[in-house]
Image (spheres, rainbow, N blue to C red):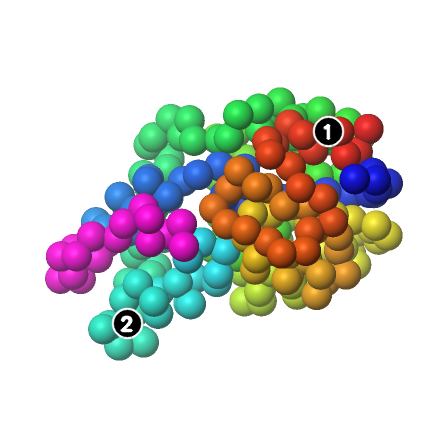
Amino acid sequence: MERKRYDALILDVDGTIWDSTALVAKGWSAAAREFGIEKPVLEEDLKKLFGQTMDRIGAQLFPEVPEAEREVLLHRCEALEEQVLEEDPCDICYPGVPETIRALSEILPVCVVSNCQSGYIELMMEKTGTADCIADTLCYGDTGEGKAANTRALVERNGFRNPAYVGDIQGDQDAAHEAGCAFIHAAYGFGTADAPEAVIDSFPALLTLVK
């Protein structure tokens, strides 16, 4: 595949940088029990839903909970998820991620856009030791907007001319293309994509696309 001269990389988090589903399921299951829901949140379910905005994930996981109460439940899910991630060593990155982010940042700006809650990207950067390597971030929790709008906003405020978004599912590709970005599919992640501009089988393979 012909290499492109990207001027920035924008990274997804879950299924691209790391797989936090087991830890998140632990936190969310604990939150659900506090609301009288004994059915656990499963890692397999989260892998199918991650990449969507929190309100959509909540509607599918907890359809029996009224919307107003579900919003409170989701805030509790987020709080316990953060607690679990803070307390755990979080050795959940895909191989070579921190080192590759650091190497990439010496070549071009590396940013992060996710449909996560506020604070999640910051926690990921803290756990991976990459905060000084990330040029900009934006997420659903910051703006209330989805990945396409946030990617477009980040691109515009940084003046990128040929950025690529790196993600693992079809929704990431759709959002990237809607935002006018090339899409690099992280094929090792949670899902598939039908028309990426490039495909990587490991995170360090990104270096071959930018050098």
Assess whether residue 94 is covered by the magenta stretch: no
Element type where label 1 sits in the image: helix
Reading the chain from its start, which is encountered first: label 2 or label 1? 2
Instruction: Where is residue 208? Give x, y as percent.
Output: 75, 29
On screen, residue 23 above or below 148: above
Residue 205 falls in which quadrant of the image? top right
Horizontal side, residue 126 vs residue 34: left or right: right
Q: Quadrant of residue 99?
A: top right
Q: Residue at x 59, y 31 (%)?
A: 202
Disc 2 marks a residue whose amino acid type is: Pro
- Which residue is found at the position 42% from the left and 67% from the top? 56
On screen, 26 above or below 102? below
Residue at the (60%, 34%) spot, across then down? 201
* Crowd around label 2: few <14 · some 14–19 · many ≥20 (10 Å): few
Residue 142 visible in this rendered orientation of the protein: no
Q: Is residue 41 visible?
A: yes
Front residue of 99 and 154 = 99
- Mark 2 highlights which residue? 63
Between label 2 and label 1, give the one nearer the viewer: 1
Disc number placed over residue 207 in the picture, else none? 1
